[in-house]
Amino acid sequence: MTRSELRFPQGFSAAALAAGIKPSGKPDLSCVVSERACAWAFAGTRSTTAAASVLRNRDLYAQGGPLRALVVNAGIANAATGKQGARDNADLADALGSVLNVPEETVVTASTGIIGHLLPMDKVLSGVEHLPEDLQPDVLPFATAIMTTDTKPKTAHATLQSGASIVGTAKGSGMIHPDMATMFAFAFTDAEVDQAALRSAFPAIVARTFNAVTVDGDTSTSDMTLVLANGQAGATDQAEFLAALEGVMRDLARQIAADGEGASKLLTVRVTGAKTEGEALTAARTCCVSPLLKSAVHGADPNWGRVIMAVGRSGAAVDIEKLTVAVQGVPVFAGKPLSYDAAAVSRSMKDAAEVTFDIDLGVGSEKGEAWGCDLSAEYVSINADYTT
C-alpha cells in the first residue's frame, strides 16, 4: 500500500486545512476524530519548559478518561507563552469539542513550531470551525499538515490477524532527541485494547523506539507520542497487538532519523553484549548523537575510534579486551585494531543510504538499537535561518 492510499482504521477520520499559522500558507491545522471513545496511552517530553499542550495532555492522562479527538497545529509550538498560552491551548481543545459535540476533556492537543510565539487564535478558532466539514479516512492530508521542516510525511501501518489495523504517522526532522518522550508520533487502531495493559507496556515500547532516535541531541518542548484505540474491530490478541504497535513505532522512528535536517544518510547503531537493555540503548544512542561520528558518516570515513569514544562516554559497562566493532558489516576492532580495507569500507559508506555500526560490549547478553543521521553543512544552514 502506498502512502497516498493509506486509510485510517475503521471509526477514525481526519481533516486538515491552512488556517494561516504558517507564513508559507501550507496546511497547518488538523484533527483526527473517532466515532467511539478511545482507550489511550501517552508519553510527553520531560523538558522542564514543556509546551502547554504537553502539560494539559499529561493532566488528562492522569485522570484516565477516554478520548474522542486529537487536534494539532503546526508552525507555532505555544511553548514559553505563559498563562495566555495555556488558555489558548485549552480554548483550542474546547473549540473542537464544541463543533464535534464531545466533551472538551476528551480532546487532546499538540502544537509544534517556533517557541515563544502566541497562537493567532482568531485564525485558529476560525479554522477549527471548518475542520469537521472535510473529515475523511485518508491519512496523507493529516500526515502532511503536522509537518514543519520535514521533507516528507511519515506513515506506517500493520494489520493484525483479527483484521484490526494500526496506522501511525509522525513528524520530526530537527530538535530531535526525545526524552519521554520538534517530534510527534500518533498511532490509531480499531483493535479492542485494555487501557491498563496498554499503558503498562507503553514506556518500554517508547524506550526502544522513539527514545532510541536522535538527530541533533536537542529535546523539544513539544515532543509527544500518543496511541488511540477505539475497539471498533473487536478483540485481538494483546501480545500480537503490542508487538505490531512497536513495529509501527520503530518504522516511524527510523523515518524521523532518516529525514533529519540536512541528512543524506540514516545512521543505525546496533549494540549487543551489554549488561542491561538500558545500557545497550544508551550506548547506541550516544553513538548516534556524537557530532564527531555523525560527521564521519557524512564524510564516509570509517573512523572507528569515534565509536570507541562514544561508547566510553556513554557510561555503559564495557570490557575493552572483548569489545568488537564492525562498520558496514566489516570487522574493524576486536579488542585491538584489525586490518581491513578502509577504502572499500569508505566506498560502502558513501554509496549506502544507511550506514550501520555493530558493537559488542563484551559484558553481557542484552542488546539495543538506535537511529540517527549524518551531520551536514545543510543542518547548520537550516537552523541558522529558521526564524529569520
Image (cartoon, helix red, strand yellow):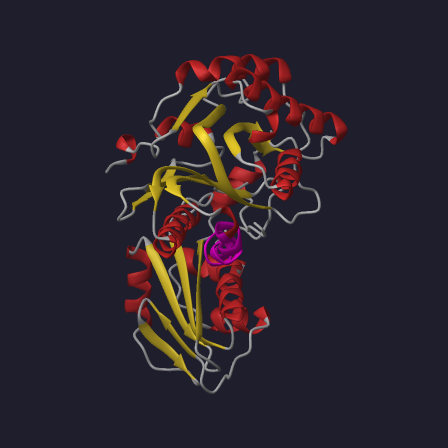
Quarter of the figure with the C terminus = top right
Which residue ends up furthest to the bottom in the rendered image?
321
- Residue at 36% x, 82% y: name it: 338
Q: In this view, does 81 lie to the left or right of 168?
A: right
Queried whether the magenta region covers residue 219, the answer comes back as: no
| Magenta stretch in the rendered image | 197-212
Q: Main secondary structure of the magenta part?
A: helix
x and y, in percent, of residue 313 in the image: 59, 70
Q: In which quarter of the image is residue 94?
A: top right
Q: In this view, does 203 lie to the left or right of 358?
A: right
x and y, in percent, of residue 112 in the image: 56, 33
Q: In which quarter of the image is residue 14?
A: top left
- Residue at 41% x, 32% y: name it: 143
x and y, in percent, of residue 260 in the image: 45, 45
Which residue ends up furthest to the right in the rendered image?
83
Quarter of the figure with the N terminus = top left
- Residue at 58% x, 37% y: name it: 65
Taking depth in this image into account, of 267 and 197 the one nearest to the observer is 197
Vertical relation: 188 (above or below) 91: below
Q: Quadrant of residue 80?
A: top right
x and y, in percent, of residue 364 in the image: 47, 80
